Every structure is written in structure tokens, then in C-alpha cells.
Amino acid sequence: MTGPAPARKKTSRSVGFTLHGAVVVLGAVAALAMVACGTDFYEIPIETPIQPKLDVSAFQRVLVAGFVAGGSEDVDANQETVRLLRSQLRTKSALRVIDADVMPLIDIAQDQNKAANEDTASAGSTGAASNNGNSGSSGAPSSDHLSAQQVSVQNQTMALPKSIKDEKDLEPYERLFANTAYWKKIGEEYQNPLIVTGTVLFTPHSRSGMVTREQEMIDAYGRHRVIPVRTYMDRKGFILRPKFVFIDGRTGATMYSESHREEILYNSQQNTPALSSYFELMDRIVPDFLSALSSQKIRGTRVLLK
């Protein structure tokens, strides 16, 4: 005898699927409602303060004196750097910028080096004459004479290259910034300001190798797409290496210094003037320079949903 077919039991899987489907439907409905009604949002401008690296509260004036500059002959890096920094400080610093002639620091360092060599040679001659008078009857120089000669050789100042092509040529000029007597004299001349000086090396640069560039293409459906492509390329450009030295005009002592390095490369077929590249690289560096002297604010926006 055939009875009624047993009823099928609903499994938890079918129940779970039903619940999942309901969630998907509700989510789709909510999304459609949001699109239909629109989403209310508004932007809030925000500012993030950055504290200065250097305490300049003791100064009312700033003197951008000049820089030991070298590299490309197409750009007078000393003149251009002084002009640019003075212009930026006038608008973005509370310090009063002193208008003065740009100091030719290479010539000043050469003069100081020449005077130091003359003083050393004079001291060596005086010491030699004294030791000759004290030498024995055999005429042989005494041990004191030998010692004076050795000290004279050790005290000879390092030669300063007149043409600066790389960082090695800049190294002998570093002692100029340690000459506290000289910078104190400059400070007294300009009523004890904060003095900004340093070195600037702006050199041409070239590089060859694989680079990634974006290439636009049209796919099989007629859609425009941009894909990254690796290709070999010859590029040329410039490297900018400034070092900013901040000196206390009251004492002539160095308060703070910082170095930067920025590089820019173009397609070898592109002809970009050296001065344009210099300003493009300095645009990256100037915010860091200003942050050493005064508090800066990074401006941005935040989006809030109602």
C-alpha cells in the first residue's frame, strides 16, 4: 500500500541562503535610495602647524649673505639662491630681511686663505732664524728647529680650488663657516642679525636605463586604457645640492646647518633651460628651508558626510 510522500525538511543551508539573499536585496535597495536622494557631504579646511627647527626669537633681522657656489656655468647659483631666499623670507617670515650686496664668498675665502698662508710662512721664517742662532758649532739644526719645521708643514692651509665642479672641491671651503671672528665682524656691521649662508652645487647629470612610462592604448572593445610600459631611455637633467648654514651674528658661531639633495631628469630630446630646472628643484627645497626659521602650516581638507 502506497502512503503519502514524506515531507522534505528544510535544511539550514537553504535558510542561510534565504537570509543572505535578503541582506543583498536590502543593501541594493538602500544603495538605490541613496543614489536617488543624493549624499550630503561637506569639506572642512584644516591646517597642521609645524614647529620651527631653530629658535630665532632673539633676532629681528636676517641677512642672507651669500653662498659658495659651483657646478653649471649656465646659472649663477650664488646670486639666484640669495635672491630667491630673500624673496621667500620677506613674505613668509617675521624677520626683517636686510638688503645688501651679495657676498662673493669664493673670493673672500681665497683672500682669507692667502693671508693665512702668509702668516704661516712668516711664523716659519722667524722660527727658523731663531733656531739657527741656537744651533751647535757643527751647524746641524737642533731638535727644536726640526719640530718647528714639522709644525709649519702641518699648519699649512689646504689649497682652495678656484673652479668648483663637485663636492670634493667644496670641502676646503667649509672652514670659512667656522671663522667666528669673520662672521662676528659681519654681524656687527649689520646690527647682529641671523646670518644665512652655505654652499650650493648645481651640476648637470645624465642617466641611461630602464624606466616605466604610461602608454595609452585601445582594447578590443574600443576602450581607452593606460598601461605601464618598461622601456630603455637616455635621460639628462640636473642635481641640486644646497647646504644652509645659520650663524649667530652676535657671536659668529654656527647655530644650525642642513643639507639637501634634489634631482630632476628629462628625456634626452627635451631641451630644458638650466635656470628653469634650478627653480623647479628649489621649489622642492624652499619649504624645508623656511621650516627651519618659522612655523609653517600644511593646508588641506577633510570630507565629512552628513
Image: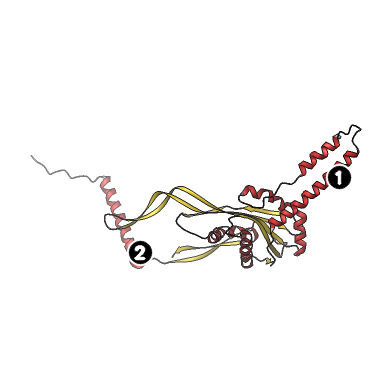
Q: Is residue 118 visible?
A: yes
Q: Of discs 2 and 1, which sits in the foreground?
A: 1
| 146 in relation to 251, above or below | above
Quarter of the image that includes the N terminus: top left
**Are circles 2 and 1 on residues that touch, CB within 8 Å?**
no
Three-letter amino acid code at the position of disc 1: Thr
Q: Which mark is residue 79?
A: none
- In terms of secondary structure, where does tag 2 sit? helix
Residue nearest the observer in this picture, 3 or 66? 66
Three-letter amino acid code at the position of disc 2: Met
Residue that badge 1 annotates: 126
- Taking the image as shown, residue 40 lies to the left or right of residue 218, namely right
Residue nearest the observer in this picture, 152 or 51? 152
Residue that badge 2 annotates: 34
Q: Which sits earlier in the primary sequence, circle 2 or circle 1?
A: 2
Residue lying farthest to the top in this orientation: 138
Among the 4 quarters of the image, the one containing residue 67: bottom right
Residue lying farthest to the left in this orientation: 1
Q: Residue at x 50, y 65 (%)?
A: 44
Q: Is residue 246 visible?
A: no
- Taking the image as shown, residue 181 lies to the left or right of residue 293, namely right
Q: Residues within 10 Å of mark 2 (few under 14, many from 20)?
A: few
- Provide residue 208's location: percent of width, then percent of height: 47, 48
Residue nearest the observer in this picture, 14 or 180? 180
- Taking the image as shown, residue 75 lies to the left or right of residue 128, namely left
Quarter of the image that includes the C terminus: bottom left
Residue nearest the observer in this picture, 245 or 136? 136
Q: Residues within 10 Å of mark 1 (few under 14, many from 20)?
A: few
- Taking the image as shown, residue 28 lies to the left or right of residue 143, namely left
- In terms of secondary structure, where does tag 1 sit? helix
